[in-house]
Image (cartoon, rainbow, N blue to C red):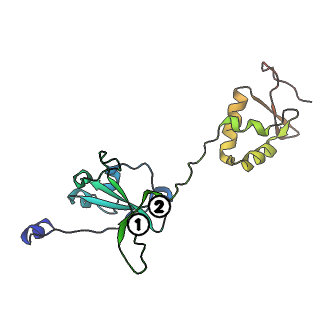
Amino acid sequence: MNPLLREFKCGVVVVHHTNKPPAGREKPDWSGGDFAYLGGGSAEWANWARAILAVRSLGSHSVFELRAAKRGGRLGWMEADGETKTFTKLIAHANEPGVICWREADPSERPETKKTKRIYTKADILPHVPADKPIAKDALRSKANGAGIAFGKFNPLIAELVEDGSLFEWLKNGRERIRKNLLPVFHNPKPH
C-alpha cells in the first residue's frame, strides 16, 4: 500500500472491526498498546499504521470511548484541568433527530460501570453456621449460596476454616456435618 500512497501523494483511513472481547466482555484494564492491536488479523496492520484510533463500547448504545491508541500524544488532548495529557475522549451519537454524527459527550453521560465482583472469604461463611448446634454441610452450602457464595468457592473456604480451627467437620450417618469450634484450643470435640 505504501508505494501507492507515495505515488499518488495521499493518505488512507483503514476502518476495521474489532476482535471479540476476551471472556465476552471488554477488558477494563487494557493499556494503550493493547488498543493499538484491537483489530483482528495480522499485527502488520497496527505496525504499519502511523496512528490508530479505537472506538470502544462502554455498555451503552449511544456513548463510547474514543481512544488514541498509537501516537495519541500528538493530538494534544487534555483533561479538564488543561494541563494533564489524555488519550481518551468520551463521544456520543448526535442528540438531534435525523442527524448522524459524533459529538463530544459530557462526563455525566458516561454509563455506570458494573460493580466489581465481590471476592468472598472464609469470614463470609461463619455467620451462616449456627453457634449452638451443628449444621449439615449441604444445608450450609445452600445458605452460603443464597448469600452469593458460589458452590465452587464453598469447599475451599470450609477447608480454610477447618484448618484454622474455626470450624469442626465430621461424618454422622454418612453425612458431613459442621459446627463452630467453641473450644479455645482445638481438642477434637465429640458432638452429641
Look at the image and tell me in which quarter the N terminus lies. Answer: bottom left
Identity of the amino acid at label 2? Glu
81 relative to 11 in the view: left or right: right
| As drawn, 124 above or below 80 | above
Residue at image coords 32%, 63%: 41
Identity of the amino acid at label 1? Ala
Q: Which residue is mark 2?
A: 109
Residue placed most toward the observer, 169 or 120: 120
Question: Could you say where residue 9 lies in the image, as x and y percent from the top left?
Answer: 9, 69
> SS at mark 2?
helix
Disc number placed over residue 92 in the picture, else none: 1
Question: Could you say where residue 32 lies in the image, as x and y percent from the top left?
Answer: 33, 50
82 relative to 118 in the view: left or right: left
Residue placed most toward the observer, 35 or 158: 35
114 relative to 94 in the view: left or right: right
| As drawn, 129 above or below 93 | above
Residue at image coords 67%, 48%: 150
Question: Could you say where residue 145 lies in the image, as x and y percent from the top left?
Answer: 72, 48
> SS at mark 1?
strand
Residue at image coords 30%, 54%: 69
Q: Residues within 10 Å of mark 2 (few under 14, many from 20)?
A: some
127 relative to 63 in the view: left or right: right
Look at the image and tell me in which quarter the C terminus lies. Answer: top right
Question: Could you say where residue 19 lies in the image, as x and y percent from the top left?
Answer: 39, 62
| As drawn, 171 above or below 51 | above
